[in-house]
Amino acid sequence: MAAVSSTLAPFTTWPWQHWATKRPMMAALSYGEQSYTWQQVSEKVEDYAQGLLAQGVKRDQLIAAITPNSLEAVWLLLATVRVGARYLGLNPRFSAQELSDLLDALQPNVVWQAESVDFVASAQWQHISFEKLNQQHLVPVTWQPSRAVTFTLTSGSTGMPKAVVHTAAQHLASAQGLLEKMNYQQGDSWLLSLPLFHVSGMAVVWRWLQQGAQMAIPAGGDLEQELTKVTHASLVPTQLQRVLQAQEQNSDDISTSSSSLSLKEVLLGGAVIPTDLTSAAEAAGIACWCGYGMTEMASTVTAKRADASNGVGQVLPNREVMVKDGEIWVRGESLCLGYYQNGTIFPVIEPELSVDQLSTDAWFRTRDLGEWQQDELVILGRADNMFISGGENIQPESIEKVLLQHPQVLQAFVLPIDDAEFGQRPVAVLATKAALSAELEQELANYMAKAVTRFKCPVRYFTLPSELMARGIKISRAQVQSWLRTQ
């Protein structure tokens, strides 16, 4: 199904320079008590770009940034784009071995890591320093939206993550399509609450650049406090729940000095979205959106106002979606250039497809299962997650959705274990509000017995290990499966 096509208004220069000309004194970026106009943003990016050139960074080189979100990380990202290089964000929570393996696989030319990161990259990589990023050098690179600018790792739900390559034009097409639905305008501020090493965080930056609005970088660990200062945010349901609960407590406490929420719209993702949560948010004046997306498509592909249906909405402008033999295929202006491997960008198109399909408008096979229900896309799960138990096909995501509707369950993974009689049986690995006691296990077993067919009921329940929960916004299913094998 194709979305209504949009006419992109192309930038004739770097987006921050465009807005510096159009809105030089308008607020653009904030970090704690610091704030920058578009003119100041443009000047900062130019300073950092000159510094990169002074340290020998060249066009098409790859800069790996091992850092949480910060003001410096944003300057580095934009300066990297400005000099024609490519930005790769790496999760600072990865282990030293994982980071070393990724650096060995991706072979960046330059590495920068935040002072807060314990990992020390090998001396074989050139390191850059922000203390030197204030030089006077001509930056000869001109605005070319078709140049590769970012390498973003997939979530790695099955094995080693891939580096997905996008151009500025693809990021802007993704941003523009979503913002035909969501109302993010001049004067609004979007919180960069998701990491730049994940496509959902990178997408916030490009929405900001597309609209010439404002972006806020969290300066501390208090997300609820940061959300009182912005109009837009990308959140998971549990974060929104905590925000609403905090505001309710503050309204009952006449001694509190906490500000009221200024949130107008949130983009929710990452889990089943409870209807009572979105109803409470809407009652507080917050429009809740949900959708479906992927790294290869530079984030969101379909979206809608969150409601009680199981669907993920309609196709956004600049994208197309097709369901072929039960699998979801996508294409459009936001589809990536390809995967980066061994110094080469390989197309994401299936190698077995015929030559006439290997074109810029070819379809990408997502391996997600889905169907159309009343012009709305419904996600059924991953084709490679399905397993067979006693001759019955089990799609674990359908069981996880039921588990997540239980009030005690925060996160759920349903995985197969070997069984002599049935071949494989499902077990559940859970994050729960209360500790997973024998009483709670029995309560969950009784709940699932009434909610799903018998062969879909988990035969055992495990607690999701904290070390996996601390790694980022999306937990790797493959790592949960690997941990389960040790139990």
Image (cartoon, helix red, strand yellow):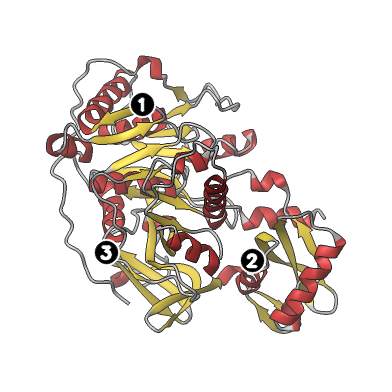
Instruction: Give the numbered dot on residue 318.
Output: 3
Estimate the x, y position of residue 298 in percent, counting from the top left.
37, 54
| Residues at marks 1 and 3, CA–CA distance in whole angstroms | 35 Å
Marks 1 and 2 close (CB-CB < 8 Å) = no
The residue pinned by badge 1 equals 34
In percent of the image, x 56 and y 28: which residue is there?
117
The kind of residue tagged 2 is Leu
| Label 2: which secondary element | loop
The kind of residue tagged 3 is Asn
Estimate the x, y position of residue 101 in percent, counting from the top left.
58, 38
Q: Quadrant of the C terminus?
A: bottom right
Marks 3 and 2 close (CB-CB < 8 Å) = no
Is residue 389 among the parts visible in the rendering?
Answer: no
Label 2 CA crowd tier, 10 Å (few <14, some 14–19, many 20+): many
Q: Quadrant of residue 387?
A: bottom right
| Label 1: which secondary element | strand
Label 3 CA crowd tier, 10 Å (few <14, some 14–19, many 20+): many
| Residues at marks 1 and 2, CA–CA distance in whole angstroms | 40 Å
In percent of the image, x 52 and y 22: which residue is there?
115
Estimate the x, y position of residue 208 in percent, counting from the top left.
30, 45
For residue 372, side relative to residue 98 (left or right) = left
The residue pinned by badge 2 equals 404
